[in-house]
Image (cartoon, rainbow, N blue to C red):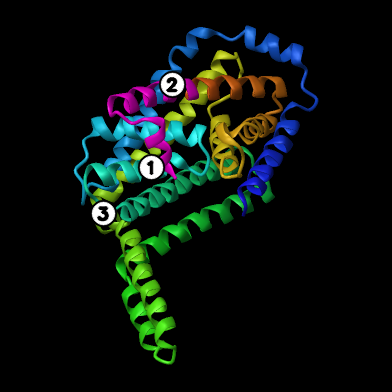
Amino acid sequence: MKPFIKNLCLILITAIFTYLVFVNIDFKQLITTVRNIDYSYLLLLPISIIISLSFRGLCFKLLISKSINIPLKLSAPLCITGTALNIFLPARAGDIFRAIYIGNKFKSDKIKLLGTVMLERVFDGIVILALLFIGIFVYNKNPIAQKLSILGVLIFFGTFLLAFLAIKFNKVNSICLFLEEKSYFLPDKLKNIFHSFLQFTNRTCNSFIEGFEVLNYPKTLFLSVLSFFCIWIFECLNFYIVILGFHCAVNWSITLFIISFIALACMIPSTSIFIGPYQYAVITAFNIYHLPKETALAVSLVEQSIVMITTAVIAFIFLFKNNISCKDLKKESL
């Protein structure tokens, strides 16, 4: 897709969700809601955000521990920087940056690290949908929502199973050799091109699959999954702190829906900082509890703003400390 058409589509998607967010909003009520927030709760939020993202650093450290011994004091700020870049730049640039940065620093295979990052996203999906599954079956027993949540869980567990089978029964070499043997009828020039393509594919796929190596180590895998649950418990806590700051009389269950909906909404292509889908996800979750749209919008704007500021400050410190310029960042992330 051409960049112009792609950007136009992203702007259109963002515009649609932004309209859905702000339509029928009482702006006077929105301003009043923001003014009435208990700011003492917001002082706790950056601490909770840093803890949740530090657990992501621990997860990343565990997932690559069998090939790279990365200290937590590096993996934690690196993951926070990656989160900031994912917020402000398109195409999950932060995840790509993490793989390239660690690959360069530790002289490791970048494709393998990208495989690990992909596995990390699968674990995220499993945990998020597990939370949504609990929320729907315990707090909101809607038959359609239950079926959709089961479908989502099956998709992510299916992806996990494919990753497990790929690392246990890697057949890439055999498939490439089989295709190479069957290409004898091709003209020499075309055969050489095809063989070069197979060699590249073989190398790339094997490197990517090697990124799943943690699946061979049950203890490390268990600790990784446990860390992922800690991440999302603190993510729920982040929103619950803001909700309490707005004096909303709701229980913890609302955060299960908020986090799940936001994670799913952020998969929707949009412009940077997820303007539109992010707010609409929170509004949808609040609607389940029949809470005002203005309160939902205020909660989403405040929480997202503090996340952006917190991660941006740490990312700036990390990039400055490691002498990474905007030019280097653009080069590594593309």
Compared across the picture, whether 238 is left or right of 31 comes to left
Which callout, 2 or 1, points at the residue further toward the start of the chain?
A: 2
Question: Of the residues shown, which amino acid type is indicated by label 1?
Answer: Glu
Q: What stretch is highlighted in magenta?
A: 308-334
Q: Do the residues labelled 1 and 3 touch (CB within 8 Å)?
A: no
Q: Which mark is residue 129?
A: none
Residue sitting at 71 percent across and 27 percent down? 290
Disc 1 or 3, which lies upstream in sequence?
3
Q: Does the magenta stretch include residue 85?
A: no
Q: Residue at the left extreme?
A: 69
Residue at numbered disc 3: 218
Residue that sits furthest to the front in the current view: 189
What is the chief secondary structure element of the magenta stretch?
helix
Say which residue label 1 marks. Answer: 332
* Distance (Cα) linking label 2 and label 1: 23 Å
Residue that mark 2 sits on: 310
Label 1 neighbour load within 10 Å: few <14, some 14-19, many 20+:
some
On screen, residue 61 versus residue 136, left or right, reads left
Q: How many numbered circles are shown?
A: 3
Question: Between tags 3 and 2, which lies in front?
Answer: 2
- At label 2, the amino acid type is Thr
